[in-house]
Amino acid sequence: MPSPSRCRRICDEPAYDSFAPCGTAAGAPISLTLDEYESIRLIDLEKRTHAQCAEQMGVSRTTVTEIYERARHKLADCLVNGRPLQITGGHYRLCDGTARCGGVPCRKSAAARTPTAPIRTKGANSMRIAVTYENGNVFQHFGHTASFKLYDVENSAVTAAQVISTNGSGHGALAGLLAAQQVDALICGGIGGGARSALAEAGIQLYPGASGSADAQVEALLAGSLAYDPNTVCSHHDHGEGHTCGHHHEGGHTCGGHDHGCGHHG
């Protein structure tokens, strides 16, 4: 019996996951998996060698060559035959910020350790709540939030608040950033299964599906009246219909930690 294949490590999920030709598309969409996407990003965009790509993705050079050739064939089919492209699924895990990318420390790790401003020291008896933040409101996509607003709470009242930048950290590093800032609870909009698992491992209570004013949502949480939906997910890699956040159950999402479709083998 062949041994199970290893999860392929990818840096982050793509910001754009659906492409289509102008005019009428010819044929059914082609699905490019996230590990195939990562091989294209590393080899064609960043000009890494197959050996460097293999090291970064945590697989053999032979496996990278197979992934890359499959990805190139799919891209050629899209370009030549005018078929839509959707980036979804795959056998992968998100980088946790501990890898060495091309021989240098991971940018996620550096971003997580370097906030743009000094973070206020958390009091011994304080609770710290984080909110995905944009223009005063709850930002609706956890993995792409550029900022968090941190609220320190004592005796059910907010005593201090501060906005911090994520410095470009993606899905795989955001939970670590929040844990490093001693966050106890997170209010957000849509969020994927891998991020949920990472937050749970860090002991951070999650309140997804919230919207509106960030300040108002924190006050509602403290008053016990926060309107949120524990089943809210981000469907970025569960569906082939573009990048949408909504209220869906995560049926079929077999993730352990940051692993997507990888089960429990390395």
Image: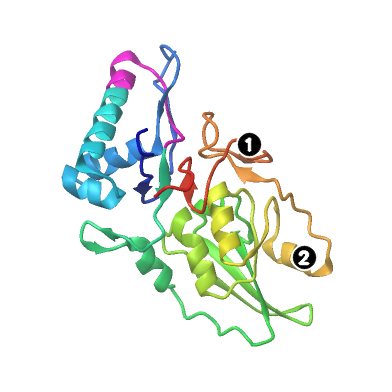
Decide whether residue 199 is among the magenta residues.
no
- What are the residue bounds of the magenta stretch? 76-90
Above or below, 146 against 8 in this view is below
* Residue 255 position in % (x across, y down): 53, 46
Q: Residue at x 51, y 29 (%)?
A: 240
Coloration mode: rainbow
Sooner in the amino-acid sequence: mark 1 or mark 2: 2
Q: Residue furthest bottom?
A: 124
Label disc, if present, on residue 140 of the rendered structure: none
Q: Amino acid at mark 2?
A: Leu
Q: Residue at x 60, y 72 (%)?
A: 183
Q: Which residue is mark 2?
A: 221
Q: Residue furthest front?
A: 1
Residue 14 at least partly seen: no
* Residue 252 position in % (x across, y down): 59, 35
Q: Amino acid at mark 1?
A: Gly
Label disc, if present, on residue 251 of the rendered structure: 1
Q: Gap between marks 1 and 2, in whole Å? A: 28 Å
Above or below, 224 against 252 in this view is below
Above or below, 154 against 16 in this view is below
How many residues crowd mark 1 within 10 Å: few (<14), some (14–19), many (20+)? few
* Residue 80 position in % (x across, y down): 28, 16
* Residue 179 position in % (x across, y down): 53, 70
How many residues crowd mark 2 within 10 Å: few (<14), some (14–19), many (20+)? some
Callout 1: SS: loop
Residue 28 at least partly seen: yes
Q: Is residue 9 left or right of residue 238?
A: left
